[in-house]
Image (cartoon, coloured by chain):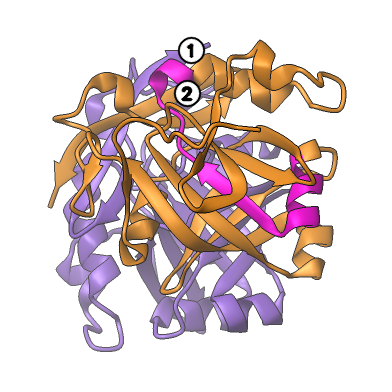
Chain colours: A orange, B purple
Amino acid sequence: MLPSTPAEHFAAVPLNKAYRLLNHGPTVLVSAEHAGQHNVMAASWACALDFAPPKVTVVLDKATRTRELVEASGMFALQLPTVPMAAMTVAIGTDSAKTHPGKLQQHGVELFYAPGHAAAPLVQGCAAWLLCRVVPEPHNQQTYDLFIGEVIAAWADDRVFRNGHWEFDTAPDALRTLHYVAGGQFYATGASVRV
Amino acid sequence: MLPSTPAEHFAAVPLNKAYRLLNHGPTVLVSAEHAGQHNVMAASWACALDFAPPKVTVVLDKATRTRELVEASGMFALQLPTVPMAAMTVAIGTDSAKTHPGKLQQHGVELFYAPGHAAAPLVQGCAAWLLCRVVPEPHNQQTYDLFIGEVIAAWADDRVFRNGHWEFDTAPDALRTLHYVAGGQFYATGASVRV
């Protein structure tokens, strides 16, 4: 049983602002649960797809345990790891739960449920979270490993996202999100550029 | 007729490294051409989809002129605008060629063709370019405005991407790429984080 105590600074994000959590292209962690089993993997290929209702896409390889849980439960969560979580992100994106059944504990992943939402566990320490229901598209899932989800609830750390806006420049740098390239190399979300 | 002189520092990227150009989640410009007409729009919702052959997804609203050119030609290019191009990016993502037929000239968009690739024009000043052939998926295109493209050629500015790696930290800051949020606000690609 996971704790239902959420992260500190865990604040609801209105659904009409949820796309902004993914719009800057961050690397995500994908979590899912089915029949008492849960898992988390890293994914670079997640993207907003629509504003209202908010939808997302995410690519989930057939070899992953998390994908099996997503397919069985029809639910997943995307969440945005922060700079201090870079090593954990690479580790849980590299080790499979199929060969490393203790990977979450080994890599220090702490899970919790958002109050009233036990369909998928969330990862502590992230900057934002999006709970999604799979929009079944078997052809996309089979041919491209591409899953579409409708966002049914969203939250963010209110030190770094509030009033519908990211505030990376005034929040602690440890709350900056990550953008993965390859080979253990990320870029942090950088300076604000206003037009 | 557009010039075929490419940007300075315009260097081919091997197709097996092309996914790295999009992996960090940058905002893109989408260009296309059909029957002598060309256009360019901005898009936040572009994402890598596969490694080999490299594929991408991009969301193209039905109201856009660029989408019509993509559907007619079966080709498009994605390219990564840099920090100095932020205002242009917002402008060509806001103004439609349908109501602003002179929008490219008005906003200073300079186009060129990559040598040997006249299927879609490319935008000068970007950090990287991916030329893509549409993989027809009418259901996705109609229902979700979601287009899949196979990358058939890729290039980057060799001051900022070389030997298969982004080098933002040693390149001029003006070559940093952009990550759009909303309302004219971007974040630049930030500091390197290595695990």
Q: Is residue A31 visible?
A: yes
Indicate the position of residue B161 as horizontal and vertical percent values. 47, 27
Q: Type of residue at label 1? A: Arg
x, y percentage for residue A94? 71, 22
Please tell me whether mark 2 sits on a helix, a strand or a loop.
Answer: strand
Of residues B81 and A115, the one drawn nearer to the viewer in this rendering? A115
Residue A147: image quadrant is bottom right
Residue at position x 23%, y 76% from top? Answer: B95
Is residue B15 shown left or right of residue B185?
right
Marks 1 and 2: CB-CB under 8 Å?
A: yes
Element on which disc 1 rests: strand
Say left or right for A45 vs B5: right
Magenta stretch, residue numbers: A66-85
Residue at mark 2: chain = A
Callouts 1 and 2 in the same chain = no
Q: Residue at x 72, y 74 (%)?
A: B136
Parent chain of label 1:
B
Q: Provide the residue designation for mark 2.
A: A186
Q: Is residue A31 above or below residue A12?
A: above
Q: Tell me, yes or no, whether the highlighted magenta stretch contains residue A71.
A: yes
Q: Amino acid at mark 2?
A: Phe
Q: Is residue B62 magenta?
A: no
Residue B40 percent coordinates (x, y): 37, 68
Query: Who is closer to the viewer here, B174 or B48?
Result: B48
Find residue B194 and name its label: 1
